[in-house]
Image: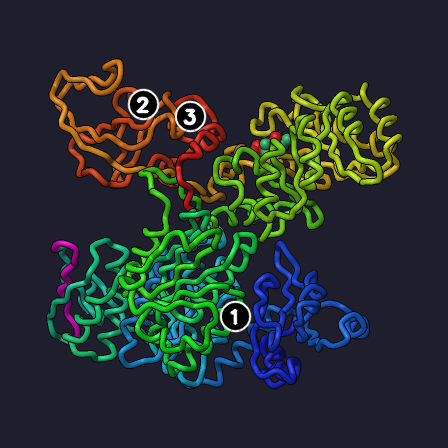
Amino acid sequence: MLTFQQLQSITRAQLVQLVQPLPIVHLLTDSRKLSQPAGTVFFAIRGKYNDGHKYLGQLYAQGVRAFVVEQGKPEELQQLYPEANFLQVKNSLNALQALAAWHRAQFNIPVLGITGSNGKTIVKEWLSQLLSPEELVVKSPRSYNSQLGVPLSVWQIQPMHTYGIFEAGISQPGEMENLEQVIQPTLGIFTNIGSAHDEGFASREQKVTEKLKLFAHVELLFYCADYDLLHQQVQAQGIHSFTWSRQHPEADLFINATSTVGHKTIVVYTFAGEKQRLAIPFTDEASVENALHCLAVLLHRRLPLSDIQDRLDRLHPVAMRLEMKEAINSCYLIDDTYNNDLAGLAIALDLQASQPQRGKRTLILSDLLESGLPEEQLYEKVASLVQAHKVQRLIGIGPTIGKYSHLFSEADFYTSTTDFLKHFEPASFRNELILVKGARVFGFEKIVQAFQQKVHGTVLEVNLDAMVHNLNYYRAKLAPDTKLMVMVKAFAYGSGSFEVANLLQFHRVDYLAVAYVDEGVALRENGITLPIMVMNPSQDSFAKLRQYNLEPEIYSLEQLQAFLESLEVGAKYKIHLKLDTGMHRLGFVPEDFEKLLAMLAQHPQVQVVSAFSHLAGADEAVHNDFSEQQIAAFRSMASALENGLKYKLVKHILNSAGIVRFPEHQLDMVRLGIGLYGVEATGSEQEALRPVSTLKTTVSQVKSIKQGETVGYSRKGMADVAKTTATIAIGYADGYDRRFSNGAGQVIINGHRCPIIGNVCMDMCMVDVTGLPVKAGDTVIVFGPQLTLVELAQRIGTIPYELLTNVSTRVKRVFYSE
Ligand SMILES: *Cc1c(COP(=O)(O)O)cnc(C)c1O
């Protein structure tokens, strides 16, 4: 691998030469996000799960003409892609970083680097807002803080900017040096040190040491001296610092006291020998800490107190989530009220473009604030983004954007959100994928509400980032050429089949599997093009199966006979054979093979793609011997089939639990199910997965129950003492199991666990909230990260699979990414 210094020789000049004669340079690392081929340089990066070199041909066909690659013979590349320019390097990611580092070095402005376990993104967003009256800030979009995200962030610096704020996150030793060279921070904030990514480091000390490398050359580091580990190391290394503390009076900023008054926290502090007080518009601990970091920076800049207070008053929570949900008239909403700057808009448009099958693309966009660009130039950039992402309909809202209506085609403009809502005609929106992106002051949540279908109190929130994390966790266990089939049967284990399938397609899994033909048809109609296996196709659905290019699992001679009889002449078909090795559910046994092979020999137009079997007890160690027997039986049956057919089959037997327990038996493919949804079925690696789903409802009413009175049907809930109960809007018709009745189940309200009292009803149930601060309208967590499916399943003697798939389709699904 080349060193960083050697890579510095890749200059922008060389890159520009690469994209000649095109003036703009876009750095592309994800082939799916191409929007402007002209002037794009693609960096073919080899990651753990994918390899950018696979997409050269596709990108060339789409018009990209400049590539940074690691592999390939120059003559061959030139022959394959005659009009393209190639730059060959040892490591494309390092080349990207080196290029960004070179770019960064062209600008002599203060650059603040932020690292720490939590709060990086919020501190970055807040500081950039707090400094905006006098600085033109360039900052990382969202939480772009990785080896890849940091160079892309830094690449945004332009001559007009006066201040940079970039976050850096690492998950193991040896990563921060690169990020330091890219960001070249002159100032730093170390937010805090907690447990995040502990698994990547030998100790907390090591984690602090590694993270501190970001500040190797800063002029000043802001941090809270109450984190002992951090404080010791900063002092030992002699990094010039500005400390704040609640414990050490000698800190630069000493926090004498904090107290909560209404929705504010009053901070009494001592700075430069003077005692002062300020109000922070938050009360939770994390926000107060984040705000104190910002306060330290503002005080160090010697801003007048009244100014500081003024600016703090205008801080608001940062909406970190980008939500996707169904809306009126078969529309679908992407709700991104995070902030509204150019970089954020580009990311949200990428996401919209990644769902091509959703119908017409509509963008509802407010004025962009604080871009620092002259208006005309700003909206020209917006227009080119809108055009590059093939937005078909634009609704511009605000006093400014409308002045540039000539830049947009098919667009309507309104002066304010109220103005838009006054003219809102629901019927004029149909089958559209609507991205709602507005700066906070425009109050776009009102627009989102107007578009949403009737909101029931109960929603299942699905965290798409957690799902991707789980997918990658299992992928990391696979040998490089093991294929991955993901089970999206039963409405993707209750999570919502289309959204999950779409995510999996985006992340390039090899196969999907559903239980019934209708499930496969629904995926095809929503634009899923991955191969799909149908596990239990009924004979009357064979025609549909072929019409929608779905591949049947064939498990018996009778079924095969029926399938063969239904074939049309001349066409080719793909099937999968299920073998019974001990589950005794569906599948061929060796005695069937002679007939099976004879039938297949007569129908050469039918290709057996794969042979597979299913483990009956992979989740439990007591069955390991049995599982091994199943695997051995499968191997020998599959090779008998291959010998008979005279061609190779894709062979697969492992489910989620099997992937964890029998890594040596991955064969050609594995079938991931429950693990994707956050439950590790063997129980031994649960900590490594992220919970995906949170089921939430609301409190409908709070009641006082006198001693001796009863609650609910059959008078099962007995108040032995006076109680307070809350009636919550979920019942067994929503999938809340009736076995949770009478204390078996618990929910969480305002952080407190509350037991179910009485029997669960069809649409509601009652919980005991005696002595707790609970009121109508409060949010109730039925299951989620704090109250796990594993625990709840144990409480009523079932398995997480059942709880997940029981959540009724009348419960609205909301998908979000962080
Ligand atoms: C559902 C299913 C799986 C996935 O099982 P998990 O335990 O959820 O991983 C794999 N193979 C077959 C045949 C299945 O029906």
Mark in front: 1 vs 2: 1
* Cα separation between marks 3 and 2: 18 Å
- The residue at the point 57 percent across, 78 percent down is 25
Res. 212 image quadrant: bottom left
Residues at badges 3 and 1 in contact (C-beta under 8 Å)? no
Q: Which residues are magenta?
A: 261-271
Would you say 132 lies left or right of 480 here? Answer: left
Percent across and percent down for residue 42 are 63, 70
Compared with residue 108, is residue 658 higher up or lower down, i.e. above or below? Answer: above
Amino acid type, label 3: Gln
**Residue at 19% of width from left, 17% of height from top?**
710
N-term mark: 1 or 2: 1
Amino acid under label 1? Answer: Gln
Q: Which callout, 3 or 2, points at the residue further toward the start of the chain?
A: 2
| Residue 387's disc number | 1
Q: Name the residue: 26% across, 58% down.
A: 287
Q: State the image quarter where residue 36 is shown.
A: bottom right
Q: Earlier in the sequence, mark 3 or mark 1?
A: 1
Point out residue 140 in the picture as x, y percentages from the top left corner: 43, 69
Point out residue 230 in the picture as x, y percentages from the top left corner. 35, 62
Query: Marks 3 and 1: which is nearer the front?
Result: 1
Quarter holding the C terminus?
bottom left
Q: Which mark is residue 760?
A: 2
Element type at mark 1: helix
Numbered disc 3: secondary structure: helix
Q: Residues within 10 Å of mark 1 (few under 14, many from 20)?
A: some
Q: In the image, residue 395 lies at what x, y percent?
A: 40, 65
Magenta-drawn stretch, dominant element (helix, strand or loop):
strand
Residue 642's disc number: none
Q: Is residue 226 visible?
A: no
Where residue 794 is drawn, which disc sits there? 3
Q: Amino acid at mark 2?
A: Val
